Image (tube, grey):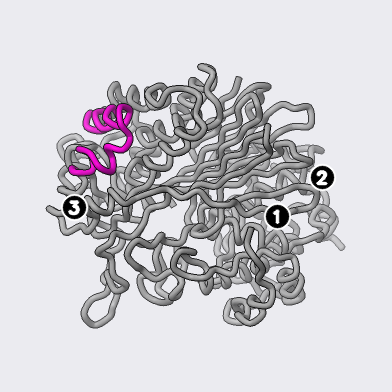
Amino acid sequence: MIFSYFWTVRARATAGWSLGLLSLLVNQPAWAAFITPTRSSQGMVASAHPLASQAGLEVLKQGGNAADAAVATAFALSVVEPFSAGLGGGGFLLVRWQKTGETKALDFRERAPLQATRNLYLDPAGKVRPGASLDGHLAVGVPGTVAGLSDLHRQSGKLSWAQVIAPAIRYAEQGFVVSDRLAAVITARTALLKNPAARQIFTQNGIPYSAGALLVQTDLAKTLKQIAQAPQSFYTGPIAQAIARDMAQNNGIVSLEDLRRYRPIWREPLCGPFRQAQVCSMPPPSSGGVHLLQILNLIGDADLKSMGWHSPDALQLMASAMQIAYADRATYLGDPAFVKVPVAALISPAYAQLRRPEINLQQARPSNQVKAADPVLLQKLQRSESSDTTHLTVVDPERNVVSLTFTINGPFGAGVVAAGTGILLNNEMDDFAIAPDTPNLYGLVGQDANAIAPGKTPLSSMTPFIVTKQGQFRLAGGSPGGSTIITTSLQLILNVLVYDMDAGAAISAPRLHHQWVPDKLRLERWGFDLMTINELKRRGNPIEEQSDWGNASLIVGTPDGKLEGAADPRGEGTAAGF
């Protein structure tokens, strides 16, 4: 059959026959040519901005370990990529120590303030108030970034706390050149103009900074210096007081007590086998690890390589598995401190085996025919459990690894800066189900499991992952992208483990995504040829071609013990090694 031959040729091209042939078969824009990975023998940092990667590399060269470099990179990203993540946000990380083989997960996600209520964003008639969970001080959750990074460093860092924050202070105090990407997001995020503190930082007399300008953040530099002396000042000292005062003056509900009570949580990572590898990722309140493992289980032993890379059969299998996982996400996932999440059942091979017969490679199912798991079935399988965002990945010379995703949610978060601090505040409250079946910023819907409650953590899609093989580091990475984070991480893993791609090809390859609702199979517009698209349509898939998404970072361990690193060509990041 012509289809199988055509996609088998493409798969072989991906495995190393001829990337030139692949470029002919897939109509890619200039940036999307498969990039060449950075290679090194000692350590590697990959992140969404060159200055942040250099900050992490600087710390590694000073003798720091993966934890030191991850903290340095994250603080630097908070300065140079302010629209994606920062001190006013939160996130998740995995850390693995090669000597012991231990992997740990840290939840430093934002939490709902104590004054939050289930109907916080509804009007008296029970209707959602447009924009209330996205713009302004009421959209802000209690930030966790500083607490999380501080805890990681306190437990595992080698260098001093001041040393690892020094690059970020330098970038804030001396300034850095505004990129095209940053200038475009400043211009697009009109909410910044409504907040005096944000307008003062990101515009010149009300005119957004243009590419090539020098952006100096004096207040943020002062804040970082205070944190370098005493990280707890963010939660109990002058910084906390400034945040609480700004909240009180602008109808926000994050209080001094909210900040004082905040603690990051160390959790057991979710790990499971895929082929000969072990895949680890985040447990709830992230949905990332649950559904990454669930989709890998649904794919199971299917011979994706023989089907051909991005053949209709391979794509249909992935899309159908994604549908099932996202239907379960909408029903069952939430903060485990508030709801019982059937994690063990959802990631069990037995559950995947029961759901796999629902997948028909020749015929897509409408989303209204794809149901969440039957709760009685999940109870039987349950056992004792052992958007704009950014991601960074670090591997040190001892092959210790940190994979870290953090965020302020939408571009520039809530569009507000806590006056006098330089800190952009998140709009993470939008990640709750503000009303049943009401889509959030990324089109995801939820039910009671993810309803707002005081002190509760909103459900996330962040999926930092670390993969080992026979006890040795194999790959680590992650991506921003809201609801697409899980499926982007999935495809990075498949591209390396199944299709034998190097880090550059794996991160450059075009992506697909299905999240159950809305019922659309999304394809990156530039990456799929007409023959493939028409065949997927014939099988009943509602296709939506979109511009590119995600901004991943990836580090791969090669058989000879070296490292390959790559930052997504969809963004402006780099991998830096030595």
| 3 vs 2, front mark | 3
Q: Residue at x 76, y 43 (%)?
A: 14
Magenta stretch, residue numbers = 218-242
Label 1: how many residues lie within 10 Å, few (<14), some (14-19) or many (20+)?
many
Residue 247: give its label: 3
Residue position for label 1: 272
Do the CB atoms of the residues marked 3 and 1 lie less than 8 Å apart?
no
Q: Quadrant of the C terminus?
A: top right
Which percent across, then down, holds residue 540?
66, 75
Q: In screen coordinates, is 185 left or right of 226? A: right
Q: CA distance from mark 3 to mark 2?
A: 57 Å
Residue type beneath disc 2: Arg
Mark 3 or 1, nearer chain start: 3
Helix, strand or loop at disc 2?
helix
Residue position for label 2: 12
Give the residue furthest to the left: 249
Q: In screen coordinates, is 435 left or right of 515? A: left
Mark 3 or 2, nearer chain start: 2
Mark 1 or 2, nearer chain start: 2
Residue type beneath disc 3: Met
Which percent across, then down, holds residue 563?
68, 29
Do the CB atoms of the residues marked 1 and 2 lie less than 8 Å apart?
no
Residue 161: image quadrant is top left
